[in-house]
Amino acid sequence: MTGSEPNDDKAAAYSRGVDAGRIEQRLQGHDEHLRHINGSIDSMTRALQSLTEELRANVALFSASVVATHRDTEQRDRIAEVRVEEAGIVESQRTVRWTAWQRLFAVVGAIILVVNFGLGLYVAFNR
């Protein structure tokens, strides 16, 4: 049995070596797969960071636009209020309020004017 034991030991060692090689090969495959997954995660992280920065920039632009629009609206409202007040002042300066006695004199003067015109036509055409 001594002669077959070294062959059996060699065969068992060979078998263990083959098994170890298979295990090593599987481990290398798993390592490559994990590196691929880590690379994918890294690229996704960079893409998300890029999107986050772009989103922040867009939000800042939108916020600035809203603030500018709000400020412009307030300024337009203030300008409109001032113009309405100025128009009211100018209108009140243009508007002449007649007192009662001024109206009475205007009506009496208009009546006298119409009567004189009628008398002038009567005299001119009846001769």
Image (spheres, grey):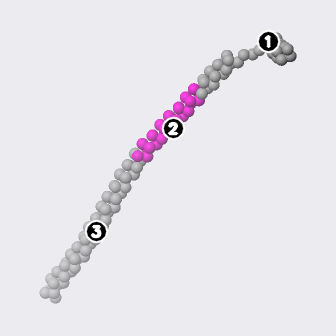
Q: Amino acid at mark 3?
A: Gly
Image quadrant containing the N terminus: bottom left
Instruction: Determine crowd level at label 1: few under 14, some 14-19, many 20+ residues with C-alpha closer than 10 A.
Output: few
> Which residue, given by chain and number where applicable, does mark 3 sit on?
29
Where does the magenta region start and end? 54-79
Q: Amino acid at mark 1?
A: Gln
Q: CA distance from mark 1 to mark 3?
A: 111 Å
Residue 119 lies in the magenta-colored region: no
Quarter of the figure with residue 106? top right
Sequence-wise, which precedes: disc 3 or disc 2? Answer: 3
Tell me if residue 77 comes above or below residue 93 in the rendering: below
Q: CA distance from mark 3 to mark 2?
A: 55 Å
> Which residue, given by chain and number where applicable, does mark 2 sit on?
66
Q: CA distance from mark 1 to mark 2?
A: 57 Å
Front in this rendered view, residue 24 or 113: 113
Q: Give x and y (percent) for residue 9.
A: 18, 81
Q: Mark 1 or mark 3: which is in front?
A: 1
> Which residue, given by chain and number where applicable, does mark 1 sit on?
102
Q: Mark 3 or mark 2: which is in front?
A: 2
